[in-house]
Amino acid sequence: MSKTSVSRLARELKQFLAAQQEDDLIVAAAPKAAAMVSSAKTEEKQAPQVLFQQPVETQTTSKIAHSGDTLTIEFRRPASVHSAPILQEDSSMMTKSQKETALKELAEKIKNCSRCPLGSTRLNAVPGEGNVNADLMFVGEGPGFDEDRQGRPFVGRAGQLLDKMIVAMGLTREQVYIANIAKCHPMIDPSNPDKHGNDRAPNADEIACCRKYLEEQISIICPKYIVALGGVSAKALIADAKSLGALRGKFYDLHLDQVTLPRKVQILATFHPAALLRNPGWKKDAWLDLQMVMDKLGLKGARK
Ligand code: URA
């Protein structure tokens, strides 16, 4: 192979690798790049052998060298990605599979959590579920009776209404991410988890204990918009003690305590579906709130 062909190939590979910003893409780039090499139309019959070096932590630039028929490619793995922390400084760097892995690890931590007394009375922890790449995330206050049994968020009556609200927006439950401020069922009478109507809002200590889990979730998923369902969620996320009525109808930039978000995430507060079941007259206002989000997301039916 001529020196010019090798240089051209090296240039193409360098461009290809430069386009891969993330660690697992770089690793996955090995067979892809090898395939590129083997399928490349070179002037000679035999393609050079490609060696992929292990990422070198201290390197600052990609390096490509060739000697004889061997093309050696070294590349830098960003330190922040290498250690694969759950608290990402730049979670927009995460791929879908990295997000899935990080959320699975986080869910395990939540399932084993006993940071507050709810950990010893829950039947199941409820970490959250949905599309890890969702543009829209809903955050409720905490699991109730049904969620405690199934380990899934919003699966009871309030959840059925939330599903309808999501569909009315032109989305499906599978397209969004659903989580709660508290990950375990707050009960009025913790000695009786089988009692219906035993739900209560999480208290300040429980919210504080769970906060890091929600912040980690938000930083991993990094949605564009969050809808805070109800006053507890709105106050905790907007960090404002005003009433839900005063917080509604306006987008706020989200600021987290433990994580710097890599891109702007905005939050809008609306009524909790359970409150809408009790007060159907509020549905009209909730729909106005949801239409504001639809407008931002470019969904049909939004009020301009
Ligand atoms: N209410 C909530 O706030 N969250 C749930 O998951 C269910 C009901």
Image (tube, rainbow, N blue to C red):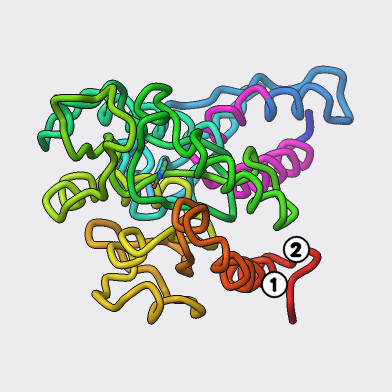
Most frequent secondary structure within the magenta stretch: helix
Residue tagged by mark 1?
Answer: 295
What range of the chain is rendered magenta? 3-31
Residue 64: give its label: none
Relative depth, front residue between 21 and 259 = 259
Is residue 18 highlighted in magenta? yes
Instruction: Residue 35 in the image: state x and y as whole percent.
Output: 75, 23
Residue 86 at least partly seen: yes
Q: Decide: is 122 above or below 181.
A: above
Q: Identify the residue at image location x=22%, y=45%.
A: 210
Q: Is residue 85 left or right of residue 6?
A: left
Foreground of the two, 27 or 198 = 198
Identify the residue at horizontal 57%, vertical 55% (top origin). 136
Q: Read off the residue under disc 2.
A: 299
Q: Is residue 298 positioned above or below 159 on the image?
A: below
Picture mark count: 2
Left or right: where 8 falls relative to 30: right
Q: Position of residue 94 (x, y in %)?
A: 48, 44
- The 10 Å Cα crowd at callout 1, few under 14, some 14 to 19, many 20 or more, is some
Q: Residue at x 63, y 41 (%)?
A: 173
Asked if the residue at tag 1 contacts the one at tag 2, i.e. Cβ–Cβ closer than 8 Å, the answer is yes
Q: Nearer the viewer, residue 20 or 290?
A: 290
What is the quadrant of the N terminus in the image? top right
Which quadrant would the C terminus be assigned to in this image? bottom right
Q: Regarding ligand 1, which quadrant of the image does it lie in?
A: top left
- Is 231 left, or right, of 50 in this rendering? left
Where residue 15 appears, as percent x and y from the top left, is 66, 48
Amino acid at pointer 2:
Leu
* Res 63 seen here: no
Residue type at tag 1: Asp
| Residue 109 is one of the magenta-drawn residues | no
The Cα atoms of the two marked residues, 2 and 1, are separated by 6 Å
